[in-house]
Amino acid sequence: MEAIRPVARTLLRDRAYQAIRDAIVAGEIEPGAVVRDAEFAELLGLSRAPVREAFSRLVDEGLLESKPQSYTRVTAVVASDVRDAAAVVGAMHELVARTAVPRLFAADVEMMRSANERFAAAVRTGDVDAALVADDELHDVLVRVSGNRAAAATVARYTPLIRRLERRRFGEGGNCRSAGLHERLIAACAAGDTDGAVRVTAEIWRGLAALADEPDEEPGGTSAVSTEESGGASAVSTGVADGASPASAEETAGGSARRPAPEPAHQPAREPGDAPVRRADR
C-alpha cells in the first residue's frame, strides 16, 4: 500500500514536543507539576523515546527543569526570563520588519489586515486561544517575507516563554496586544514606511516585556510570577520522574531533537496586477 509509509522519527519527536509545549503554555500543565515520560507516552500514543527527547528540548528552552535521577518538572514563570525573552524576540521582529517591509506585496498586507480583524474579534469575546493564534499569523507574515531563518528559529524558540505570561494576563482581563498597535504597524507596512514599522514593532514588544513587572497575586496572596533568577529556588512541588533513566541507543538513533526553522522562501499569493508595496506606489 503506497499510502501507508513509516512515520519519520523526527515527526514523532516534533509531535511530542509541540503537544507538551502547547499544554505548558496554555497552563494545562501548571508550574511545578512533575512530568513523567511513561505517562505522556501513553497519553500521546508514542514510545518513551520521543517523549524523553521532547523533555530534553523543553529543558533546553526553559519550559522544563530536570534533576537527574530525581525529577523533571514545569518551570515557574520567572519575570526576568520573560523580560529577557521579550527583548530577544522583539529584536528579531524589528530585524525582520526592516528586511520585509520593502519586499511586501499587497496580498501580504491584506493577510496582516485579515489576521488583525480576527485578533480584534477574539479580544472582544475573550477568546485567548484565537487571539494569540491570530497575533502569531499577523507577525509571521513579516518573518516569512524576510526570509531570515535564524530570526525565525529564535522567535520560535523564545516566544513560548512570553506566551505563558501573556495568556495569564489576558485571562485576568488584560488587553493582550492592542489591535490599535497592529493597525499602525499594518499602515506603515502598506505605505512602505520601514522605519515606522520598526518603531511600532519595538513599541509592541516593550509592552510585552512590561507584563513581567505587573503585580500578579493569587487568592492566597502569593505571587504567581516568580521574581527569582533562573537558578533560584522556587516554591513548587517535587517528585521522582519515571523518565530519569537515559534512552537506549536504539531509541535515540534518530539523533537530537531540533525544531526545523520555517521555510524562508517568500511566495505571496499574487492577484492580477499585484505588485510590491513600495514608496513609488503610494
Image (spheres, grey):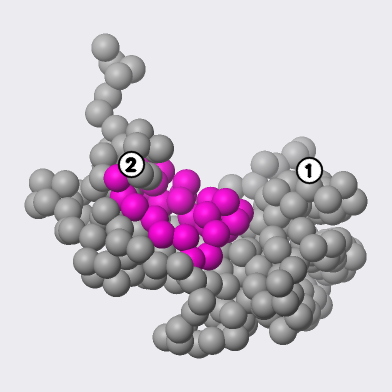
Q: Residue at x 33, y 17 (%)?
A: 3
Question: 108 and 231: which one is in front?
Answer: 231
Quadrant containing the N terminus in the rendered view? top left
Q: Position of residue 201 (x, y in %)?
A: 74, 74
- Mark 2 sits on what residue? 41
Residue 169 in view in this figure: yes
Question: 109 and 66: which one is in front?
Answer: 66
**Where are the magenta residues, as a range?**
11-38
Q: Amino acid at mark 2?
A: Ala
Residue 31 is a magenta residue: yes
- Mark 1 sits on what residue? 273
Q: Amino acid at mark 1?
A: Gly
Q: Position of residue 118 (x, y in %)?
A: 81, 46
Please indicate whether residue 52 sits to the left or right of residue 17 in the image. Answer: left
1 vs 2, front mark? 2
Q: Residue furthest front?
A: 220
Taken as a whole, is the magenta stretch helix, strand or loop?
Answer: helix
Q: Residue at x 18, y 58 (%)?
A: 245
